[in-house]
Amino acid sequence: MIPLPNSYLAIRMKKPIDILKEYFGYRAFRDKQEEIIQTVLEGKDTLVLMPTGGGKSVCYQIPAMVKEGLCLVVSPLISLMQDQVEALKQNGIAAAYINSTQTVSEQRYIAEQCLRKAIKLLYISPEKVQTERFQNFLRSLHVNLIAIDEAHCISSWGHDFRPEYGQLGELRQRFPEIPMIALTATADELTRKDIIDQLHLQNPQSFVSSFDRPNLRLEVRPGQDRIKQIIAFLNDHKEDSGIIYCLSRKSTESLAEKLRKKGFNAAPYHARLPDNQKAKVLRDFLRDDVRIVCATIAFGMGIDKSNVRFVIHYNLPKNLESYYQEIGRAGRDGVDSETVLFYTYADVMMHRKIIEGEDSKKKELKVAKLERLQQFAESSTCRRKVLLSYFSEPFEKKCENCDVCSNPRKTFDATIIAQKALSAVYRLQQQVGIKTAIDVLRGSHAQNVTSKGYHTIKTFGVGRDISFFNWQNYFHQLLNLSYLTIAYDQHNALKITPKAHDVLFKKEKVFLVKAQSQVVATPIPTKTKTEEAADALFERLRKLRKVLADEQQVPPYVVFNDETLKQMASKRPTTREAMLEISGVGLRKMAFYGDDFMNEIIDFMVTDGQKLKGGTLITTYHFFQQGKTPEQIAKERDMSTMTIYNHLIKLYKKDYKIDLRRLIGQEELDEIIATAKSIEKENEERRLKPVFEALEGKYNYDKIRIGMELMEG
């Protein structure tokens, strides 16, 4: 574990940007972070709306380090607070949590550390913070800030309302002098206002960052043959971690089993699993021992894993907030990641039934939000534009990173197709659903058609030339364009609208997007040799990271995230200075991990026959780390032994991990040091010869110099 500083006095003297560089390894703040931090340091209440992966945590972590005292962080899930505390410790920041997983003695120890002012950030659950005993404990501390993470949970208008969050307003009333910062990734204007009201924030400064996550590819696919599509997708992402969201517990288990039979490392996760099994799945996923989790939304806010490379929605979520929150678990490190939403109208109808069956005053709101998600899924325009518009953020250009932009939809004159569909619905007396209407159009003699005499109507079989899948697609478009509606209270029967009458009786034209029977694959660009080499080095660095993480029993991304490894693979730093220029490498992690990663980079470059940055010294360093003697290195490099010894001395002085004791025995070292101490010290070059002569040539100059360096070190 990276050692923690004994005192924070020096930290409080630093500027926020210096703390960002030294402890977090980043050279500059992201959008709005610096302004938010300054507002918090001024003691003002603050509301922060920033997308997942946007750097919300830094907005309270850095003020906590600058200000005297302790920052209290209210976090909704045990796994989430544990991950965040571990990440802070890796950066050399004293943080702790108190939750139900700890024994009484462990909690008492943390409390003592807080009283001793040895903890800068204390993470706590909303239930614990509301107890009278804990609030009395808070009064004995110098609390400099209260941070409410996942603040949308406090609002009943939010998509993830939690009753235990609703009492947090009392915390502010009991400690009115302590500034508060509320943070969330998803909240519409109504939810934001409710957060401010519920927490009793006083004249808060609100910061709303862009909701755009440009590194996420957005894709919507038809829900037919989902398993086949998922397997094909996973075959292209064999080394990646990902989440597949399912609607039911049964489907998580069924899908995980099917994927395991196909050779994929997958596990199910849902609320009904035993606690120890849920904990194991989460732990294994965070540590890359399980690559794929098939989960219900129970696998939610606790996912602080930065290297999730894809999120797949096997079923339609209930609204765009949920969708945005869930896809936000991919690519938190900024690396390109993929999201796939499988869409069927059956999922829409299922959600409608669930909403209709609820005893809730918000039915209309929930239906409206479901319809917005449906519009997103059926849209023929840029997905990102539709998504961002929901959050009131204009996005005028095309994103070029969604399935619509990659494969623009072309409309055609579908008037005849529309007339056939609308006529069938009309002649079926607006009493059937989509499936039966399609069966009639295609001339099916299935029982649901013949038993009702539907095979006798005029439109029976007029659409045999169009596949069931394509007819389904066209019906969905007609619904989306308001030519049809669904009567959910009449067994999902299709109804024609006044707009449809114009098509049937006034020959108004209808333009639809051509239905495709299969997903059009996005062409994979050919990689250059340099890019292929960077990918190969990235995989080696990823394996090294896993080994180091396993040794400490922490998730790999806590060591370094994927973006940091990709920068290493691209820039290939082989010196301390170059490594510190990599985003995500601070002084603490440099001291703890730098040499391991530089050695791996050097080994890769030598093996690959590449010229090393840092020149001949680094090459010598690489060979020495492999266990070769100076004589062997000199022979292999066609250099003198003296030159190699000079390299090793220079590297030793530059603070590289050079074990000079490999080159000299203890008796030899003792004799050289004793002789050197008995001789009057002059400058370094002039004192080697007197030692050599005093020892009567018993040791050569290389060995004497090694001994002298160790004496001084």
Image (cartoon, rainbow, N blue to C red):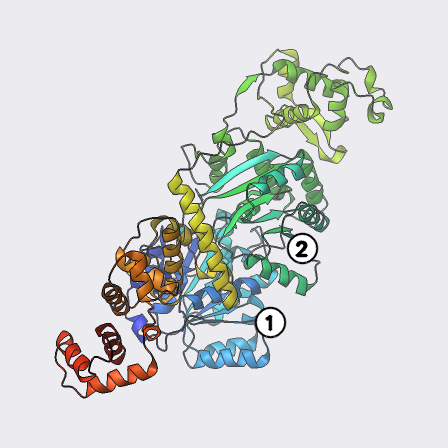
Give the residue pinned by disc 2.
Answer: 270
Q: Position of residue 248 (x, y in %)?
A: 70, 48
Label 2 packing within 10 angstroms: few (<14), some (14-19), many (20+):
many
User: Residue 35 at what x, y percent from top left?
Assistant: 33, 55
Between discs 1 and 2, the one toward the N terminus = 1
Q: CA distance from mark 1 to mark 2?
A: 20 Å
- The residue carrying pointer 1 sits among few (fewer than 14), some (14 to 19) or many (20 or more) residues within 10 Å by Cα, namely few
Which residue lies under the disc numbered 1? 101
- In front here: 607 or 538? 607
Rendered-image quadrant of the N terminus: bottom left
* Residue type, numbered disc 2: His
Q: Residue furthest bottom?
A: 678
Residue at image location 41% in from the left, 53% down from the top: 565
Tell me the kind of residue under disc 1.
Thr
**In the figure, 452 relative to 364: above or below?**
above
Residue 173 located left or right of residue 461: left
Q: Which is nearer the eye, 171 or 84?
A: 84
Whether residue 19 appears in this view of the structure is no
Q: Is residue 18 above or below residue 68?
A: above
